[in-house]
Image (cartoon, helix red, strand yellow):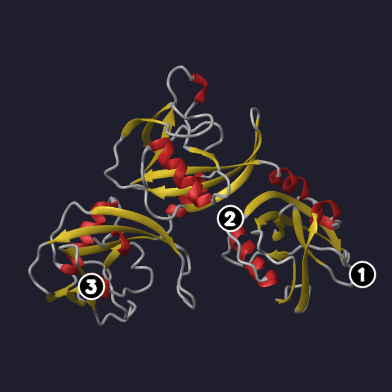
Amino acid sequence: MKQQRVLYISKNKQLLVFEQSNPRWSTMQVIKGALEPSETPLQAASRILQLETGLTLPHPVVLESQVWEFSWEGETNAELVHYIWFQAPPETPSAWTIDGSSNEFDQPRTYQHKFVPLEDIKLEWEMAVGLPKLLEALTARTRVLAYITRNRAEILVFKHDDIYPDGGVQVLGGGLEENETLELGVMREILEETGLSLTGTPAFLGARVRQSAQYGPQFEHYFWLEVDPSTSDAWTHNVSAGELDSGMNFHHEFVPLEQPGIDWEMDWFLPQLKKRMASRERVVCYITRNREELLVFDHNDPHITPETQVVAGGIDDGETLTQAATREVLEESGLKLNNPIFLGSELIQSPPGFTGNTNPQLWHYFWFETTDPRDAWNHTVTGGGEAGEVYQQQFVKLENVKLAWKLDLMLERLKP
């Protein structure tokens, strides 16, 4: 079945529309486009948004999906229509013109975009179906929630004290503070409700509007972070802030990701989490000496970018992140090091112009310290797809290091 995306782009209770004079269509329309092979619904929405409006906006939300049947030139057809919402920041222009790309119905054309108050919107056909859901989302309380995983096999959950038996099993989360971004909000909630001070950028999994019997509509945004493998199995934390939870005891523990037993529909985005975790993962290893020099290498391997590298590689089946990092260091440098420090994880998008596998990768960054006296040496790689390649290892002053694409993301955390 053919799939279509109808995009609602809102700004301060205004909706982005465009108009055209063709009498076949409504004079007021919103952006619509089809799914391409291998795209997810949200990837398609982001692509269509950028092509037809020139905007690049984060955190798309699926408001509703419906199957529509229609007749066209004597034939009855059906298509699955997804209504997807983007929020534009206040500084977005009120109106602009852009030359849009072609699609299966229209030749390239000029879009005259403008924001119109929602009460003045008049859409026809299936374009208007998602508007009630949009209005509900715009009035909902905004919340952020976090899936915190350990070794990609366990997820952090909590229970209240026994005096709150109806609390059930939950993942942490809460409302946004004034002028707070979603990412800053979820990191603050993690600190307040768990005591964990995590690093890295939380990965956005998705958002939904959920009806709460107690609070009404809730606009929930789910994020994911991976913690240090050495994080405790369980602990109790006295919540440090929050209108409703401040002073409460949350009893945290890691439970199997496959059977987490989470209540209140807070497991809604676990399938997306598992898909994300199934993407290719790598460990990136910083090896320092006296916290002043970093081990880097040059090589003649045509499969690796010619820019300066550090030890990095994939994760074997059954390995923990720490085991993978320790193995990669031995295979690629010859150094036998243990007890790495976990620096954080980042979801890495493909670099501009990259033509290979463009699926995102999850990179986990670790730090090792060594006292090896050698300033430089050649090492023949002993494992992986690079086995047999010779890496020219050398220590370089941290302030002089310039690493290849995204390998330098956590370097600032090493500097004295």
Residue under label 2: 59
Q: Quadrant of the N terminus?
A: bottom right
Mark 1 closeness class: few <14, some 14–19, many ≥20 residues within 10 Å? few
Q: Which mark is residue 282?
A: none
Left or right of residue 265: residue 62: right
Looking at the rendered structure, the secondary structure element under dot 1 is: loop
Identity of the amino acid at label 3?
Answer: Val
Q: Which mark is residue 296?
A: 3
Q: Earlier in the sequence, mark 2 or mark 1?
A: 1
Q: Quadrant of the C terminus?
A: bottom left
Using the rendered view, name the quadrant where residue 238 is placed.
Answer: top left
Left or right of residue 239: residue 30: right
Q: Which mark is residue 23?
A: 1
Identity of the amino acid at label 2?
Answer: His
Q: In the current view of this chain or complex, which residue is farthest to the left?
A: 373
Looking at the rendered structure, the secondary structure element under dot 2 is: loop
Q: Is residue 18 above or below residue 162?
A: below
Q: Earlier in the sequence, mark 3 or mark 2?
A: 2
At 65% across and 51% down in the image, what residue appears?
A: 62
Q: Is residue 172 above or below residue 37?
A: above
Mark 3 closeness class: few <14, some 14–19, many ≥20 residues within 10 Å? many
Residue 389: in sight, yes or no?
yes
Q: Earlier in the sequence, mark 3 or mark 1?
A: 1
Q: Nearer the viewer, residue 120 or 282?
A: 120
At 75% across and 79% down in the image, what residue appears?
A: 108
Identity of the amino acid at label 1?
Answer: Pro
Say which of marks 3 and 1 sits in front: 3
